[in-house]
Amino acid sequence: MPVLGLLSGWRRTTGVGVLTLAAVLVALILIRGPDAPQTFGPWYPLTDQAGARASADFENHVPCTVDDPPVTDCQRVKLGVVLYGTPSAPSTYLISIVRVGTGDDTRETHEGTWTVTRGTALDPAATVYQLDASAPAHLRTFWPVSTEILYLLDQTRMPRPGTAAYGYALTSIPIGQTIQAPG
């Protein structure tokens, strides 16, 4: 009964006391311990079905003109290419495409095998990563200009020109990187 006595005492006080009690109760309801930060693992498995390990993950936002014709309402495309095996022993690949701004943020994926070939329109001796026919035709040839940068090539093996906002260079991401969402 002491609680009831306390509440009846509060009822007799001014409106300020009631408001103070209400504010304290709301604060107690709203205050909770910090939530665990949300983390996201890689979008791909660390090994392919044959057991080959992922050796390279290249990702970036690229212009919507990567699609021909571009998808309606597209703002940019999140493009990722993961290579399994190594250039000396290529295995499989996995491509991820997410079109931002279309109202459908579904991840489109393609997988198949890749090989190493030679020659871009700028350098006949350049190394080129060639993806098989399981990849969309416009996403089959890539030029690794370093271990950190992979350029998407067009049908004539020229680096694709970008826009003022986005280019077609994908950058290396650490294999299996986990990302923590800002809190």
Image: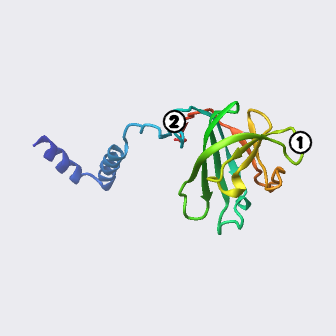
Q: How many marks?
A: 2
Residue occupied by mark 2: 50
For residue 136, the mark is none
Q: Residue at x 64, y 51 (%)?
A: 78
**Dot 2 and dot 1 residues touching (CB under 8 Å):** no
Using the image as rendered, state which of residue 162 and residue 179 is in the foreground: 162
Q: Which numbered disc flags the more N-terminal residue, 2 or 1? A: 2
**2 or 1: mark nearer the eye:** 2
Q: Position of residue 165 (x, y in %)?
A: 77, 54
Residue type at the position of mark 2: Ala
Q: How is the image coloured?
A: rainbow
Element assignment for label 1: loop
User: Along the horizontal axis of the image, is 166 left or right of 33?
Assistant: right
User: Along the horizontal axis of the image, is 84 left or right of 1?
Assistant: right
Q: Is 25 placed above or below 53 here? A: below
Using the image as rendered, state which of residue 114 and residue 153 is in the foreground: 114
Q: Residue at x 64, y 53 (%)?
A: 135
Q: Is 39 placed above or below 13 here? A: above
Using the image as rendered, state which of residue 118 and residue 168 is in the foreground: 118
Report crowding for label 2: few under 14, some 14 to 19, many 20 or more residues within 10 A (C-alpha). Answer: few
For residue 123, the mark is 1
Q: Residue at x 67, y 61 (%)?
A: 75
Per the model, the C-alpha gap separating discs 2 and 1 is: 34 Å
Q: Position of residue 103 (x, y in %)?
A: 56, 64
User: Along the horizontal axis of the image, is 96 left or right of 116?
Assistant: left
Q: Position of residue 146 (x, y in %)?
A: 78, 34
Q: Position of residue 29 (x, y in %)?
A: 32, 46
> Is the N terminus in the top left, top right, bottom left or bottom right quadrant?
top left
Report crowding for label 1: few under 14, some 14 to 19, many 20 or more residues within 10 A (C-alpha). Answer: few
Q: Residue at x 19, y 48 (%)?
A: 7
Element assignment for label 2: loop
Residue type at the position of mark 1: Asp
